Amino acid sequence: MRGRDDEWTDLMRSANAGDSVAYHRLLKSVTPVLRAGARQGLSRAGQPPDQAEDIVQDILLAVHLKRQTWDANAPFAPWLFAIARNKLIDALRRRGRRIFVNIDDFAETIPSEPPAETLPTVEISNHLADLPPRQRDVLRSIAVDSVSIKNTASKLSMTEGAVRVALHRGLASLAAKLRKD
């Protein structure tokens, strides 16, 4: 392990001094190590390792762009692995928390047709008819017609707060009525 670190450090010193062959050898030598580390990091995070190559390319690009910031008196490997760790973290943050599930596993449980309405339209209209006019209009607009609170307020010449109050009271009245029935 120590021999590899010394070799990488020597290659990076030569590369920064202008030796393109040393730079090419360095990149060729670190790439498999970075690829394995990226795959392992993705796997530990519960992510599929198929994105490892993108992370490796990000690491190599960062090394190339920032290579003049490396202290030639320090070992190269810790500097490289700090960049690799940060690029892996960046990639995981971009991906967010995702759980990959094969949809075929649930094909039998997913309904092929939408479920039927729970109450017929006539019955809904009858329940709404028993409400005060403002509550009925607000409920019909929001719950039946799927209009937003903002648009309902504009349509009924009410404030958004008044629409929310009417909606809450209308739902409470309906719930109480349905409990009695």
Image: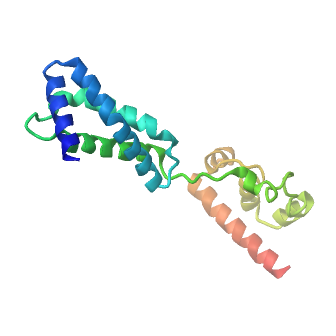
Q: Say above or below: 147 vs 25.
A: below
Asked which quadrant contains residue 175, the reply is: bottom right
Q: Residue at x 63, y 56 (%)?
A: 163
Left or right, 55 with respect to 151, comes to left
Task: Return the residue found at the far left.
Answer: 73
Image position of 124 with respect to 65: above or below: below
Q: Is residue 41 above or below residue 80?
A: below
Residue 1 percent across, percent down from the top left:
23, 47
Name the residue nearer the viewer: 23 or 84.
Answer: 23
Figure quadrant of the C terminus: bottom right
Q: Residue furthest front?
A: 3
Task: Say whether residue 50 is left or right of residue 172.
Answer: left
Report the coloring of the rendering: rainbow
Residue plotted at (54% across, 51% down): 98
Where does the image place residue 115, in percent across and percent down from the top left? 85, 57
> Horizontal placement of 122 versus 141: left or right?
right
Quarter of the image where one finds residue 178: bottom right
Find residue 29 and report its image quarter: top left
Q: Is residue 97 above or below residue 165?
A: above
Identify the residue at horizontal 72%, vertical 58% (top origin): 134
Image spot of residue 104 (x, y percent): 75, 51
Total numbered circles: 0
At a point 31% along the width and 36% down the height, the residue shown is 30
Left or right: 121, with 166 as reference point: right
Image spot of residue 3 (x, y percent): 19, 42
Front-most of 41 and 128? 41
Residue at the limit of the structure toward the bottom, as seen here: 180
